[in-house]
Image: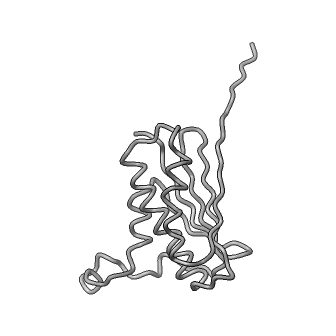
Amino acid sequence: MITTMTLTIMQQVLTLQSNTKNLRFVEPFLAEFVKESGIDSTRYHNAIIALTEGVNNAIVHGNKRDESKNVVIIATIESEMLTLIVDDNGEGFNPDDLPDPLAPENIMRDCGRGVFLMRSLMDAAEFIQTENGSRTLLRTRLRE
């Protein structure tokens, strides 16, 4: 007996110039991409927050707001999993070297929570150094 299975993979790419004004394009991009996926409302909103944080970090910290550099977002749905990749041209960082945003001395700071939020809101968040810069890899199941 031979069994075949069709696997549907959806993918879309958005390239943004490194200007924080372009963050306004992140939510419509993701909303359009996932609209037929059946993603849970909570998971969708978590993904929007995490992706926006990742893109903001790529623009501000990775590309240092250099408008000659781009941030590339790759959204993929495969096997009930949403994967969001954010690529920049930065030097990278070790997320384990970041200060704990929950430490008493950091509670009142108005920055330094992005990686914490991405890790908290997504099923997986990885930060990878690539040949051309840095990659943030975010994953979440579409449904519980």
Position of residue 123 relative to residue 111, above or below, is above
Count numbered badges in the picture: 0
Residue at coordinates 53% horizontally, 63% vertically from top-left?
A: 25
Q: Where is residue 28 in the image (x, y as percent from the top left)?
A: 51, 56
Q: Quadrant of residue 40?
A: top left
Give the side of residue 11 with respect to residue 121, left or right: right
Q: Where is residue 30 in the image (x, y as percent from the top left)?
A: 52, 53
Give the side of residue 47 with respect to residue 70, left or right: left
Q: Where is residue 16 in the image (x, y as percent from the top left)?
A: 62, 69
Name the residue furthest top: 1
Position of residue 14 relative to residue 18, above or below, is above
Position of residue 127 relative to residue 123, above or below, is below
Q: In which quarter of the image is the C terminus?
A: top left
Q: Nearer the viewer, residue 89 or 92?
A: 89
Q: In which quarter of the image is residue 104?
A: bottom left
Q: Nearer the viewer, residue 89 or 124?
A: 89
Give the side of residue 41 with respect to residue 132, left or right: left
